[in-house]
Amino acid sequence: MTQPPLLPFSPALEQQLRGWLAEDLGRGDLTAPALTGARGRAHWIAKADGVFCGGVLVEPLFRLLDAGVVVRDRLAEGTPVRAGQALLELEGAAPALVAGERTALNLAMRLSGIATATARLVAELSGSGVALADTRKTTPGLRLLEKYAVRCGGGLNHRFGLDDAAMLKENHLAWSGGVGPAIAAVRAAAPWPARVIVEAETAAEAEAAVRAGADAVLLDEFAPPALQALVPQLRALAAAQGRAVVLEASGVQPEQLRDYAATGIDLISTSAPVTRSRWLDLSMRYLPSGG
């Protein structure tokens, strides 16, 4: 990664951070009286190898508890880390540091796990020219952050929601009268920049989608040998119309990535980094006040 991806900080995200803190704090931290007037220093440590993500949330989250909390030496998002490596340093009012510790760590461990899993899959595709993208299979309320973690791991984001692009899937095609009528209806109603993607489960559906002018075809659960034959045919159909089409494979097992990449597709979409990843274990430990 040449530079960390950006995470837009919106009022909605700040509201989420407040809500997550409130979930843990309830009526207030019962340990706070033991720390009245105390200041503290602490650092975060990786307890396993992986890719760090979520550090960008630390300062805004702790500052909701105390505006004087300072974060130093934070590693860039998407940085590979080793077990035992320091990730960032915190300093501020001790009650605020302990009150925000678990919420901040939980978020970063979840996001770092996704970034780590994504990076492994992206490495499998290295040199193939095929990109790895996520899906809408995300945890409700965490979509923005989980998709951000995919980018921190080197992946691409597919659509964030139903208003990003029109993806016509099995149910759409069954209830709308088929590929052609569905695409025509969407084209007539959607803003002109919107793309139309068709999820195809058969070669006939994929060919119909290209003929009807789909911008992209998601080829769902095709085996690599079937794609080897189908991909050139779809590209030829699009070329005959004087245009190109994006071809995407889904339903791909992680161990088959290289096989799929060799078929000539443009993109592999998978929910695995979000739905199958393990949290990356991180901890926060106090530092002596003198150094």
Image: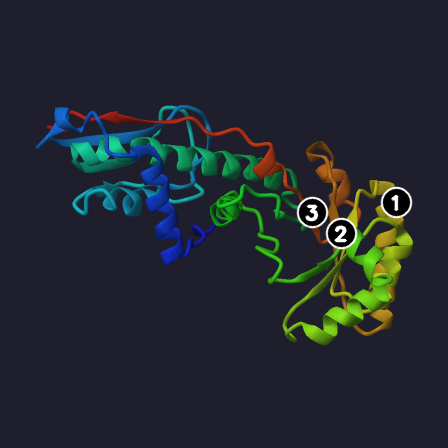
Identity, as a three-letter code, of the amino acid under mark 1: Ala
Q: Quadrant of residue 100?
A: top left
- Separation (CA) of disc 2 from disc 1: 12 Å
- The answer to whether the residue labelled 2 contacts the one labelled 3, judged by CB atoms less than 8 Å apart, is yes
Where 72 falls versus 157 (above or below)? above
Q: Secondary structure at mark 2?
A: loop
- Separation (CA) of disc 3 from disc 1: 15 Å
Would residue 56 be seen by someone viewing this image from the given angle?
no
Q: Earlier in the sequence, mark 2 or mark 1?
A: 1
Residue at the image position 41 percent from the left and 44 percent from the top: 77
Could you classify mark 2 by the number of other residues whose Cα lies within 10 Å: few (under 14), some (14-19), or many (20 or more)? many
In this view, the mark in front (2 or 3):
3
Residue at the image position 21 percent from the left and 36 percent from the top: 96
Q: Quadrant of residue 43?
A: top left
Task: Measuring from the top left, give residue 132's x and y in whole percent.
Answer: 63, 47
- Separation (CA) of disc 2 from disc 3: 8 Å
Asked whether, in this view, residue 11 is left or right of residue 261, the answer is left
Residue linked to disc 2: 265
Tag of residue 268: 3
Where 182 falls versus 138 (above or below)? below
Q: Earlier in the sequence, mark 3 or mark 1?
A: 1
Task: Measuring from the top left, give residue 145's x and y in whole percent.
Answer: 47, 46
The residue most toward the front is 27
